[in-house]
Image (cartoon, rainbow, N blue to C red):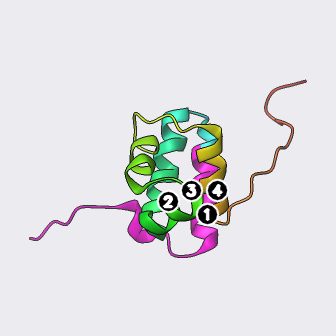
Amino acid sequence: MKITEYDTADFLKTPQDIADYLEAAFEDGEPALISHALGVVARAKGMTSVAKQAGVTREALYKSLSDKGDPTLSTFMGVLKALNIRMAIVPDKVRPA
């Protein structure tokens, strides 16, 4: 039996796949998970291309989107723009106001 390494990036083929994956990460709300998920999506789209469009070096993007990374807001927004992702702010239906 041959076992291959699983990489989520291999399964993010469509814009909807990417949106669903990131939505799940944001729903969890853990900053490290969100950063990691953005890194997975960036790898799926091509880290070099995403870094260039986001205005950062490839190395800096890998570092900031790693499990221990903490991207700046400008990097975060640049990555979203490079990935053609838009965030929406909506009221939380789980917690009362």
State which tag comes first along the sequence, 4 or 3.
Answer: 3
What's the residue at 43%, 65% (across, down)? Answer: 48
Label pair 2/1, CB-CB below 8 angstroms: yes
Q: Amino acid type of disc 2?
A: Ala
- Numbered badge on residue 66: none
Residue 77 relative to residue 47: left or right: right
Under tag 1, what secondary structure? helix
Q: Amino acid type of disc 4?
A: Leu
Which marked residue is nearer to the observer: mark 1 or mark 3? 3
Quarter of the C terminus within the rendering: top right
Q: Residues within 10 Å of mark 2 (few under 14, many from 20)?
A: many
Q: Amino acid type of disc 3?
A: Gly
List the residue tagged with mark 3: 55
Under tag 4, what secondary structure? helix
77 is higher (above) or lower (below) than 16 = above
Which marked residue is nearer to the observer: mark 2 or mark 4? 2
Residue 12 spot, x, y in % from top left: 49, 69
- Numbered badge on residue 82: 1
State which tag comes first along the sequence, 2 or 4.
Answer: 2
Q: Residues within 10 Å of mark 4 (few under 14, many from 20)?
A: some
Label pair 3/2, CB-CB below 8 angstroms: no
Q: Residues within 10 Å of mark 1 (few under 14, many from 20)?
A: some
Quarter of the N terminus within the rendering: bottom left
Residue 11 spot, x, y in % from top left: 44, 70
Residue 26 relative to residue 47: left or right: right
- What is the span of residues highlighted in magenta in the rendered image? 1-25
Is 88 contained in the magenta span? no
Residue 93 relative to residue 9: left or right: right
List the residue tagged with mark 2: 51
What's the residue at 64%, 39% (across, down)? Answer: 73
Q: Amino acid type of disc 1?
A: Ala
